Image (cartoon, coloured by chain):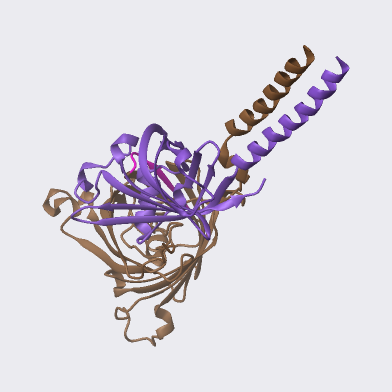
């Protein structure tokens, strides 16, 4: 007589217990956890660190207009308003053909140079399903002097106006704030002034980005050029800057000893020196325009 | 005594089977891995709209419990920069990759999951977004038709409720009120 209710209760409690425990588990866990690949984004604020390219590309269909200024050196004193009386500029634009391929064009005051380039993302830093510790891009550009040849009496060839740049960008975003980029760079110059200057210049660049707030950061960029490739009197370019992002604009304000904003210039032709106080104030201004809208998921 | 035990044994079997049947009948669950969540914010300066079409959701018809999960960086915007800012500056997706809602359909007994029709319901639960958990109640609609179960909802969330800061310089461009639209076509979850 006793066994019936007791057994019944035990069973019922067990069944209910099983049911309860089922309904208490996370409903979404029933779907099974699908691991996804999380790609790192915004390693740098814009496509330049300061003078050099950053790992960032303009997204597909986005035009990024760049206006870059470098003033004269601060040590010129108050009569030249600490260099602000003189300026060299580069006006250019970057465009994202795809999310991995960006092309760009620019024109600089110095040497009336025109430059065209392509930057291609090869690897993207990611975690999750696919794990990749660094991002890797290949940058290649042709820079062309269009100013008159200095010596009109000797035979001058069009090819003498050309410079070629090849660069690998290896970057890692270590945390939300800190990104570091290493840049082995080769600048080839078809014509150099003296035999003590090499046609091929190998240089290793390093760039840092540390965010101060969500929308501001400190950037540092330095290129170490191996000895005996440049003549005496040329300096390695060191630049220290501050990025401010406001919606569609990025303002990059910086101090640098380089006055040119293309590779043949800042790597191979910088003569000013930080230690002599030949520091230039400058800025890059970036404004993006979405020319082709991304396809939205169907609604 | 023996008889009784045998009797009770039979009864038990019947009761046990009955409980199992009930559990199975009521325990139907529905899911989707392609739930659409649309984020829309209008301001005089700028319209901001993002769509996530890979959210996951499960509804338990027996208990009325339902859950949603959306990866923040799966929202697609009409400007790449908006998407970057959404993740970097507002949602802080590297710190808080997912937005989750866990709730219960308040009047689930009124919903006949096997009978075609449109059922107005309210859902109460916790929205877990940007590291903040907030209890909310939202109106929703469950639709049962020949194709199965569908759900629609539209509601407003306030950025300030989830500690999502909008800096003063862009106050005119970005509204504190964000309209969320949810649209799901559910599948039956076979267990």
Chain letter corresponding to the colour brown: A
Which residue occupies 45% across, 50% down? B73
| Residue A208 in sight from this viewpoint | yes
Horizontal relation, residue A152 to residue A58: left or right: left
Specify the farthest residue to the right.
Answer: B2
In the image, what residue occupies the spot 54% across and 58% down? Answer: A136
Q: In which quarter of the image is residue A218?
A: top left
Q: How many labels does the image show?
A: 0
Instruction: Say whether residue B44 is left or right of residue B134.
Output: left
Quadrant location, the N terminus of chain A: top right
Q: Can residue A226 be seen in this view?
A: no
In this view, which residue lies farthest toward the left? A79
**Residue B117 location, x and y as percent?**
44, 53
Question: In the figure, what tint was chain B given?
Answer: purple
> Could you tell me residue A147's position as x and y percent?
29, 78
Say which residue appears at 69% left-offset and 24% top-offset.
Answer: A12
Q: Where's residue A290, x and y in %?
A: 32, 66
* Quadrant of the drawing holding the C terminus of chain A: bottom left
Q: Does the magenta stretch include residue A101?
A: no
The quadrant in which residue A21 appears is: top right
> Which stretch is magenta?
A206-214
As displayed, is residue B15 above or below residue A231? Answer: above
Q: Is residue A292 left or right of residue B74?
A: left
Main SS category, magenta section:
strand
Query: Left or right: A113 with respect to A9?
Result: left
Residue A263: image location, x then y, percent: 41, 64
**A288 over A16 or under it: above or below:** below
Of B98 and A29, the residue lying toward us? A29
In the rendered image, residue A208 lying in the magenta stretch gets the answer: yes
Is residue B172 or residue A18 the one in the foreground?
A: A18
């Amino acid at each position: 007589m006793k066994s019936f209710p007791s057994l019944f209760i035990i069973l019922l409690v067990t069944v209910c217990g099983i049911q309860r425990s089922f309904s208490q588990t996370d409903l979404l866990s029933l779907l099974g956890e699908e691991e996804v690949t999380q790609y790192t984004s915004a390693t740098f604020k814009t496509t330049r660190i300061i003078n050099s390219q950053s790992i960032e590309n303009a997204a597909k269909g986005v035009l990024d207009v760049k206006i870059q200024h470098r003033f004269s050196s601060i040590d010129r004193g108050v009569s030249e308003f600490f260099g602000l009386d003189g300026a060299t500029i580069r006006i250019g634009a970057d465009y994202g053909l795809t999310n991995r391929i960006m092309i760009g064009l620019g024109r600089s005051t110095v040497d009336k140079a025109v430059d065209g380039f392509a930057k291609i993302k090869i690897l993207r830093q990611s975690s999750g399903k696919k794990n990749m510790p660094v991002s890797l891009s290949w940058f290649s550009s042709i820079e062309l002097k269009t100013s008159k040849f200095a010596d009109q009496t000797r035979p001058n060839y069009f090819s003498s106006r050309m410079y070629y740049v090849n660069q690998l960008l290896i970057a890692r975003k270590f945390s939300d704030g800190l990104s570091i980029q290493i840049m082995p760079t080769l600048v080839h110059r078809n014509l150099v002034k003296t035999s003590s200057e090499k046609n091929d210049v190998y240089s290793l660049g390093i760039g840092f980005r540390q965010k101060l707030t969500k929308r501001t950061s400190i950037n540092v960029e330095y290129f170490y050029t191996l000895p005996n490739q440049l003549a005496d009197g040329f300096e390695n370019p060191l630049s220290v800057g501050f990025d401010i992002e406001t919606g569609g604009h990025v303002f990059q304000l910086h101090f640098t000893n380089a006055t040119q904003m293309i590779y043949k210039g800042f790597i191979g032709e910088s003569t000013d020196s930080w230690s002599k106080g030949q520091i230039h104030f400058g800025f890059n201004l970036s404004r993006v325009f979405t020319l082709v809208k991304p396809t939205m998921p169907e609604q | 005594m023996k008889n009784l035990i045998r009797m009770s044994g039979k009864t038990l079997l019947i009761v046990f089977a009955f409980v199992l049947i009930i559990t199975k009948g009521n325990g139907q669950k529905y899911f989707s891995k392609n739930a659409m969540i649309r984020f829309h914010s209008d301001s005089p300066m700028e319209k901001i709209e993002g769509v996530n079409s890979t959210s996951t959701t499960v509804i338990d018809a027996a208990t009325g419990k339902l859950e949603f999960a959306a990866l923040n960086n799966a929202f697609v915007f009409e400007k790449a920069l908006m998407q970057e800012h959404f993740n970097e500056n507002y949602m802080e997706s590297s710190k808080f990759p997912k937005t989750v809602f866990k709730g219960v359909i308040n009047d689930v007994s009124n919903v006949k999951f096997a009978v075609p029709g449109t059922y107005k319901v309210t859902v109460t639960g916790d929205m877990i977004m940007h590291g903040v958990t907030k209890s909310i109640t939202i109106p929703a609609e469950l639709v049962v038709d020949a194709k199965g179960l569908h759900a629609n909802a539209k509601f407003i969330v306030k950025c300030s409720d989830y500690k999502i800061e909008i800096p003063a310089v862009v106050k005119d461009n970005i509204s504190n009120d964000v309209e969320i639209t949810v649209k799901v076509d559910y599948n039956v979850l076979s267990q």
